[in-house]
Image (tube, rainbow, N blue to C red):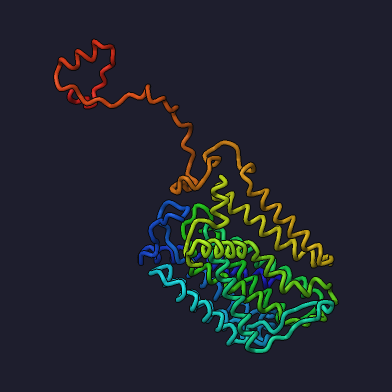
Amino acid sequence: MREYLFMALISAAVTYLLVPLVRRFAIRIGAMPEVRERDVHTTPTPRLGGLAMYGGLVVGLLTASQLTHTGEALARYDADVVTALIVAGGLITVTGFLDDWWGMDAFIKLGGQIAAAGVLVFFNMRLLYIPLPKDWGGSTSLDYTLSTIITILVVVVTINAVNFVDGLDGLAAGIVCIAAMATWAYSIFLAQSMSAGNITTTAAIAAVLIGTCLGFLPHNFHPAKIFMGDTGAMLIGLVLASSIVTVTPLDPAAIESVNKVGVLLPLMLPAAVLVLPLIDLITAVVRRTSQGLSPFAPDRGHLHHRLLDFGHSMRQSVLIMYAWAFLFAFGVVLLARVGVPVLWFVVFIILALGVLVLMAAPRWRGRGGAHSAPRGKHPEDDDGPPTGPMPPILPDTQVRRPQMPPSDGSSRERATAEGNPVIPVFPSRS
C-alpha cells in the first residue's frame, strides 16, 4: 500500500511542477488558439498540458519499477509494461502535441492512436481471452490475430471516449482519476484473495495514473490556467485502457472462487468507469452522422454542454459528472465485493441513470443568481460574476430618441417652450 501511495505522490508532484513550465512553453510557441463557437471559455487558454502529464507518468513508472514489491511484480509480468507505456505514451503525446499546435486531420490522428495501441500489443500487453463464468460457457480464448484486433479496438475506443468528454475545466482529468481509483480498488480486492503479477501491475498503472491526474487538476479546475488538450486526453485514455488490458489475463477459476460476478468484472469494470464518456461518444457519433456530418466533426451537443444549457454553472456541471462517475464505478466494485447476483447490476444501472437525470434536471439548479438563466444563448458567458438586476424595459412610447444638438438658439428656445427638457449631447458646446 505504501508503494502505491509513494508512486502516486511522485507522479502528482512531477506533473504539478512541470505544468507552469509547459504553460510558458505553450504560450511562447502560440499553442493557445482563439476561442471557438463551441467552446465554453471566453479567453484564449494555452494547451499542451499533456506534456506535463507525460513527464509525471514516465517518472512514476520508472519509480514503480525500482520499488521492491511493485518492481518484482513488473519484472515477472509477461510484458515489458514500463517500456510499452513510455513508448506508446510518447507516440500518442507527439500525435496530440502536433494536433494541439498545428491541427491535424482526424484520420491521421486516428492512425496515431492505432499505432500507439499497436505498440502495446508489440510488447505483449494484450487481451488473451474474454472472461465469462462457467454457467455462461466459460472463458473464450483469443488467438493472436483476434487478440490484437480486440486490444487495439479497446484502446482506441477508450482514447476517443476520454477525448470526447474533455470539454470542461477539470472534467476529463477528474473522471479518469475516478476510473483509475475504481480500477485500483478492484485490483486490491483481487490481491486479497489471490497472488498474480498482473494484479500488482494493474494496481501500479492505476496508482501512477491517479497521481498524474491529481497533479494536473489544481491547474486545470475552473478557472483553468491550462488545458490538457488532445495531448493529455489521449495519453490518459491510453493509460486507462492499458490498466484494463492488464487485469484480464487472470485464471477464471480462481476469480470464480471469490465470487461469480468477479469473473465478469474485467468486462464490467471498463463499462462502469467509462460509461459516461462512452455514452457521450456513442450519442455524438449518432448525432453527427444523422446530420450528414463526420463522426469527428466538433459540435456543442455533448453531455457537459447540455448540463450548461440546463442552467448549471461550469463547476456544478463538472461536480455532477464527478458524482455520477464515482457512484457508478465504485458501486460496481462494491457490489462485486459483497457478492450479489448479476441481476442486481441491472437494477443498479437503472438507479444510477435515474440519479443522473435527477441531478441534471433544471429544477435542481440553484435559485436566483446569474447561473439560473439558461446557458447556450450567450456563448460568451463563462461563469463570470453576476451583473446584478437589469434596468426596467420601457414601452416603445416612452423611449426617447437621442436628439442632435440644436443648430441655433431658436431651436433651443422652441424646445424649451414645448416643455421638453433639453440635454446637450455635447456639453462642451452648450
In depth, the one of 125 and 271 nearer the eye is 271
Quadrant, the C terminus: top left
Q: Position of residue 326 (x, y in %)?
A: 68, 59
Q: Is residue 314 left or right of residue 69?
A: left
Q: Is residue 323 left or right of residue 41?
A: right
Quadrant, the N terminus: bottom right
Going by the picture, which residue comes out furthest to the bottom? 144
Q: Quadrant of residue 145?
A: bottom right
Q: Is residue 392 left or right of residue 264?
A: left
Q: Position of residue 394 (x, y in %)?
A: 41, 25
Q: Residue at x 72, y 78 (%)?
A: 199
Q: Quadrant of residue 329?
A: bottom right
Q: Residue at x 70, y 52 (%)?
A: 355
Q: Residue at x 43, y 51 (%)?
A: 42
In depth, the one of 143 and 58 nearer the eye is 143
Q: Residue at x 80, y 73 (%)?
A: 192
Q: Position of residue 396 (x, y in %)?
A: 38, 26
Q: Quadrant of residue 190?
A: bottom right
Going by the picture, which residue comes out furthest to the top? 417
In depth, the one of 136 and 33 nearer the eye is 136
Q: Is residue 353 left or right of residue 94?
A: right
Q: How many marks?
A: 0
* Residue 136 showing in the rendered view: yes
Q: Position of residue 81 (x, y in %)?
A: 61, 82
